[in-house]
Amino acid sequence: MSRLTRSFAFRWALGIALWSTLLSLMLFAFVYWQTAAFMQDELNQVLRHEVRYAARDPGQAANRIETWISEDLHSVHFAGLFGPDGKKLAGNLDARPANLSLDGEVRRIGTEVAIAGRRLHEDLWSAAVALGDGTVVVVAHDTDEIDRAKSTVIRALGLALVPTLAFSILGGVLLAGRAKRRLASTEAAVARVMRGDLRQRLPVGDAGDEFDRLARDVNGMLDEIERLMDEVRSVGDAVAHDLRTPLTRLRLRLERGRDQARDIGELREAVDQGLVWIDQTLEMVTAVLRIGEIEHGRRCAAFGPVDLGLVVSEAAELFEPLAEDKGIDLEATVDAGVPAIEGDRSLIFEAISNLLDNAIKFTPAGGSVRLGLDRRDGDGDAVISVEDTGPGIVAGERDQVFKRFYRAERARQTQGNGLGLGLVAAIAKLHGFSLTVGDGRAGGCRFEMECPVADRRSTITE
Amino acid sequence: MAKLLLIEDDAATAEEILADLRGRGHAVDWAATGPEGAARARTGSWDAIVLDRMLPGLDGLTVLRDLRGGGDRTPALVLSALGDVDERIRGLRAGGDDYLGKPFVLAELAARIEALLRRPTDSRETVLRVGTLELDLLAGTGRRGVRDLDLLPRELKLLEYLMRRPGQVVTRAMMFEEVWNYRFAPKSNLIDVHVGRLRKKLEVDGEPILIHNVRGEGFTLTPDV
């Protein structure tokens, strides 16, 4: 029972029934009140009119009340003309009702009347007026008619209430039951997800209502969670794998150094080699941590206005000697009309550096690397591009390159840990930049980082 | 020889740092906890303090903040396993003069301590001289003896940085931070290439070497006379 009362469906059914019953009751009360008031008002007007009509001409008063009485087929009209001494002069009322003010207003009084030869106590709606000679004219109407009409209305309304209540409850139960069935299937799916089956999805109907939209959103969330879980799993595997290789090498090298070194020089050589490998390993661990740190958005303290033109020029200047040493032509073009954006200049510089470092690494001597900053369609978002004449990235691998530890087939021969572009992607995501890779114009590949420009009018003046 | 205080809770790390710094001729004392370190820092007279960010008992930044609050301006270097930029900013705001993220190379730590110890050089000087080398910062010109040097703006800054620290080992990371003003470990041999270019302009036709490569540590500029 407690489960039933806690049930969403049950409470909805009850709530809907109660609410519609309450509304019906209010409607009934209004109809009753309006009907009764209308009937009473009509009668009052008739009585007021009749008593005044009778009083207007005292000589004709007796005639007029006789007419009032004779118009009546159901013995509900009463009237009387009484002398100053209270003696009945005409009409079918035996005595002047006591306590009836002579102001012509309609009041409810109880009195004895004779109907079809029997004396009965009746409640009457009555009005009385005194004539100039001290006689009093009384016009009255039985209350039964209105009372009956009132009780009829009440009975009818009461009878109607029963089916209203029944249909309300039925409707509530049906609606709630439908919601409950949809909930039950959703609940079952969620339970399976909670037991660890992340591939489970909520049923989505084709009605497109709020329920379906919610289910779709939850499914989207589950997609993202599943993707992240997969990524965490694969990153964990990759880290472990990438750690084991250098650690194994290190162990072997140290072991051999200890056993076979003939002098301190050879031992030192073994240790030096070991240190290089440890540094590479630490570099990888640091990179993984940095990517995590950046992805968690914990690095916003250093955010401020960044002059992209300056950052791009400085990056080009930093890499120019390296490119020249490798026989690569590094050229930077900067559009001066790019406004400052909000970001971490050191991180943006690092992202550009990683892209440049890659481009120079993969471009053979005699090739060229182009670094550019311009605006999409002349005045749109800022675009930082790095284009090389290296081997390029085949279309199938382009989505993969930004993933941690991914190293393209053609990159396996060069030194690296597969984290450089992962870091660039994390930095881009932190800043809300979109990062894409495509074909370069002269072979090779072209990386583009598109930076939304908030205020399109303010340009750098310094 | 300088008197240094190391506040570091990990005994193995502390032992390596102590051995290295003592090997370089410094007198180093070690405190393993925050409260102990705070007490030693206040009572002793130190040339520089190296302290870990996270210490048992009392947080490293709190120790530093209390010290600075008491008017103590002893140069301090903050070590931390929390390497991110926000942490670094917090460390510097608490009164640290430099910040080094773990893991680090001992030579990097030693070079940075050396830089802290020698810090107060007159930065208003506009003409620097080291041996026969002369740099006019206002005119943006350099000379070695009578020979004019044709230096690019960045080379000028790099040379200024080295000339303000003659005989002192500076690491690649320190140069990248101070000359380029960016903060992360630069890849490949970027800095070496820049130093190499500068050397080609400074040392021509068998002139005595000015900039020396200190293996595993960094570079140092030594006077030629």
Image (tube, helix red, strand yellow):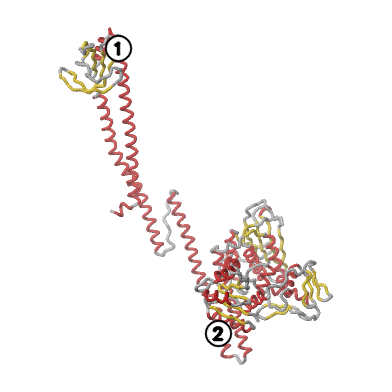
The residues tagged by marks 2 and 1 sit, at their Cα atoms, a distance apart of: 133 Å
Residue sitting farthest toward the top: A59
Three-letter amino acid code at the position of disc 1: Ala
Q: Residue A53's spot in the image, x, y percent? A: 31, 13
* B63 left or right, relative to A360: left
* A365 left or right, relative to A64: right
* Residue corresponding to mark 2: A252
Q: Residue B6's spot in the image, x, y percent? A: 58, 78
Q: Chain of mark 1?
A: A
Q: Indicate whether B27 appears above or below A118.
A: below
For the question of whether residue A86 can be seen, the reply is yes
Q: Indicate whether A51 appears above or below A223.
A: above
* Residue corresponding to mark 1: A55
Three-letter amino acid code at the position of disc 2: Leu
Local crowd at mark 2 within 10 Å, few (<14), some, or many (≥20)?
few
Q: Secondary structure at mark 1?
A: helix
Q: Secondary structure at mark 2?
A: helix
The mark closer to the camera, 2 or 1, is 1
Image quadrant assignment for residue B102: bottom right
Q: Indicate whether B206 appears above or below B122.
A: below
* A264 left or right, relative to B154: left
Marks 1 and 2: in contact by CB < 8 Å?
Answer: no
